[in-house]
Image (tube, grey):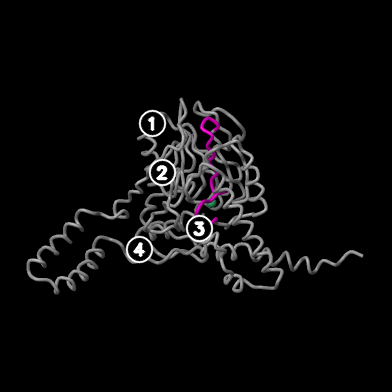
C-alpha cells in the first residue's frame, strides 16, 4: 500500500511512541498509548468528575473506573489483531482488514488476506503486515483445518501483503518474478517505515523474500482447481488467484471496494486493462485487496470508475496548465464520497501521477508538427 521512506533502525522504532506517517500518505500523530499514560489521563478526568459527586457517588465512580481499567486491556496492548476468518464459499476464506491507513491503533491490519482449503492442503493469499499478523493468520487457519499449508503467495510487493511471511515455512513462499525482485530491492525500506507507523506491533518483523517464482496458469494445488494470473497496473506485478472450485477470485490490490485505491506504483492504463481481463473471468465472488468482498463485479466497477476519473482529472489539469496545488482543490465527485480516505488518497495520487502527466504534456508541446 505504501511507499518506503527514510529507513529507521528497528530497535529505535520499537522504543519510540507511534509517529506520524511520511510525506504523502501520512498517518496522524498519536499520543503514547501505554497503560501508565492511559491511567494518568483517566485520573485527570476522574478528579474533575469526582469533585462534583456526593461521597457514595465518589466511591462508586472510583471503583467503576478501576474495574474498567483492569478488565479491558486495549486492542493495542494485547497485540491481538482479532482476525476473524470468514468462509465466502466452501473452502474459500477471507479475513477482511480495516479501511484505514496504517497506524499504531490498527497495527497495520488494513489488508484483506485469504486462504483456500483443498482436500490435501491450504493455499494462503498474502501474509499481512507483520510477523505477529502472519502468526495470527496461521492460528486462524489452524482453527479451520489441520491440513498443511502447501503454498503461500505474495500478490505484490506492498508491505501489508508480505511482512507476515516469517510465520510460514520458507519452502511454501512464492510470488511472481518481478514481485520477488521488488521485495528484494524495496522490502527493507518498507519494513522500516512500517515500524515507524505501527510501532511495537512490528516487533521482530523481518523481510523474508520468497524463494520460489510462481508458474502461472490453471493447475491443481492442494487438491484444488486454481488459476494464477500474472497481471499488473497497481504495481509492476499483481497476482490474481482464481479458485475455480468455488468461483472465487482473489483480486488483490487490482480491486478496492469502499476504500480509495492507492497509486504509489501505479500504471493506470495497464491497471484498467487488467480490470478488463478480470471482468471476463467466469467467477461469482470477488475478494478485493481492501474492502468488503462482493458477490458481483461492483467492486471492480467502482475501482475502474475511480481510476478513470483520476486519470482524466490529472490529464486535464496538466493540459490546462494547473499545478499540483490547484489540483488538490478538485472536488471529489459525490459517487466517490463514501469511499474511505477519498481526499487523502486523491492528494497522494496527484503527487504520484501529476509529474509524469505534466512531463508528457510538455513533450507533446515541444514535438514539431509534421508537414
Ligand atoms: Zn498494494
From mark 4 to mark 2, how far is it between C-alphas? 23 Å
Crowding around mark 1 (Cα neighbors within 10 Å: few <14, some 14 to 19, many 20+) is some
Query: Element type at marker 3?
Result: loop
Decide if ligand 1 comes within 8 Å of the CB at mark 3: no
Q: Nearer the viewer, mark 4 or mark 3?
A: 3
Q: Earlier in the sequence, mark 2 or mark 3?
A: 2
Residue at point 46% right, 25% down? Answer: 119
Q: Quadrant of residue 218?
A: top right
Q: From what the image shows, is residue 141 above or below residue 233?
A: above
Q: x, y percentage for residue 59?
A: 9, 65
From mark 4 to mark 3, how far is it between C-alphas? 29 Å
Q: From what the image shows, is residue 314 above or below residue 191?
A: below
Residue furthest left in the image: 55
Residue that mark 3 sits on: 339
Q: Earlier in the sequence, mark 3 or mark 1?
A: 1
Q: x, y percentage for residue 4?
A: 52, 58
Residue at point 25% right, 63% down? Answer: 38
Residue that mark 2 sits on: 134
Residue 247 within the magenta-colored segment of the rendering: yes
From mark 4 to mark 1, how far is it between C-alphas? 38 Å
Q: Earlier in the sequence, mark 4 or mark 2?
A: 4
Magenta residues span 244-261
Residue that mark 1 sits on: 145
Q: Earlier in the sequence, mark 4 or mark 3?
A: 4
Residue that mark 4 sits on: 17
Judging depth in this view, the residue of 304 and 103 nearest the camera is 304
From mark 2 to mark 1, how far is it between C-alphas? 16 Å
Confirm or deny contact between disc 2 and disc 1 (CB under 8 A): no
Amino acid at each position: 500500500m505504501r511507499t518506503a521512506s527514510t529507513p529507521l533502525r528497528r530497535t529505535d522504532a520499537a522504543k519510540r511512541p507511534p509517529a506520524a506517517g511520511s510525506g504523502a500518505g501520512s498517518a496522524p500523530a498519536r499520543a503514547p498509548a501505554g497503560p501508565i499514560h492511559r491511567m494518568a489521563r483517566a485520573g485527570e478526568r476522574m478528579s474533575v468528575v469526582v469533585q462534583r459527586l456526593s461521597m457514595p457517588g465518589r466511591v462508586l465512580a472510583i471503583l467503576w473506573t478501576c474495574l474498567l481499567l483492569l478488565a479491558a486491556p486495549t486492542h493495542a496492548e494485547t497485540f491481538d489483531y482479532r482476525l476473524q476468518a470468514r468462509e465466502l464459499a466452501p473452502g474459500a476464506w477471507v479475513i477482511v482488514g480495516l479501511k484505514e491507513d496504517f497506524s499504531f491503533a490498527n497495527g497495520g491490519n488494513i489488508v484483506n488476506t485469504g486462504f483456500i482449503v483443498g482436500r490435501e492442503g491450504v493455499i494462503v493469499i498474502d501474509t499481512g503486515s507483520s510477523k505477529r499478523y502472519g502468526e495470527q493468520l496461521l492460528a486462524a487457519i489452524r482453527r479451520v483445518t489441520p491440513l498443511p499449508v502447501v503454498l503461500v503467495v505474495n500478490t505484490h510487493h506492498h508491505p501489508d501483503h508480505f511482512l507476515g511471511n516469517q510465520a510460514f515455512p520458507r519452502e511454501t513462499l512464492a510470488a511472481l518474478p518481478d514481485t520477488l525482485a521488488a521485495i528484494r530491492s524495496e522490502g527493507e525500506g518498507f519494513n522500516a517505515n512500517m515500524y515507524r507507523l505501527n510501532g511495537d506491533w512490528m516487533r521482530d518483523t523481518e523481510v523474508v523474500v520468497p524463494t520460489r517464482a510462481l508458474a502461472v496458469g490453471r493447475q491443481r494445488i492442494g487438491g484444488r482447481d486454481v488459476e494464477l494470473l500474472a497481471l499488473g497496473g497497481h504495481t509492476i506485478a499483481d497476482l490474481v488467484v482464481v479458485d475455480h472450485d468455488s468461483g472465487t477470485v482473489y483480486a488483490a490490490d487490482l480491486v478496492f471496494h469502499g476504500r480509495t485505491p492507492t497509486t504509489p506504483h501505479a500504471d493506470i492504463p495497464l491497471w484498467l486493462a487488467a480490470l478488463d481481463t478480470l471482468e471476463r473471468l467466469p467467477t461469482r465472488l470477488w475478494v478485493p485487496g481492501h474492502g468488503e468482498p462482493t458477490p458481483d463485479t461492483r467492486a471492480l466497477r467502482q475501482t475502474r470508475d475511480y481510476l478513470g476519473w483520476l486519470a482524466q482529472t490529472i490529464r486535464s489539469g496538466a493540459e490546462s496548465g494547473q499545478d499540483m496545488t490547484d489540483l488538490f482543490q478538485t472536488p471529489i465527485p459525490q459517487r466517490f464520497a463514501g469511499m474511505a480516505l477519498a481526499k487523502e488518497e486523491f492528494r497522494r495520487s496527484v503527487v504520484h501521477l501529476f509529474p509524469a502527466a505534466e512531463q508528457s504534456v510538455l513533450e507533446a508541446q515541444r514535438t514539431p508538427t509534421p508537414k
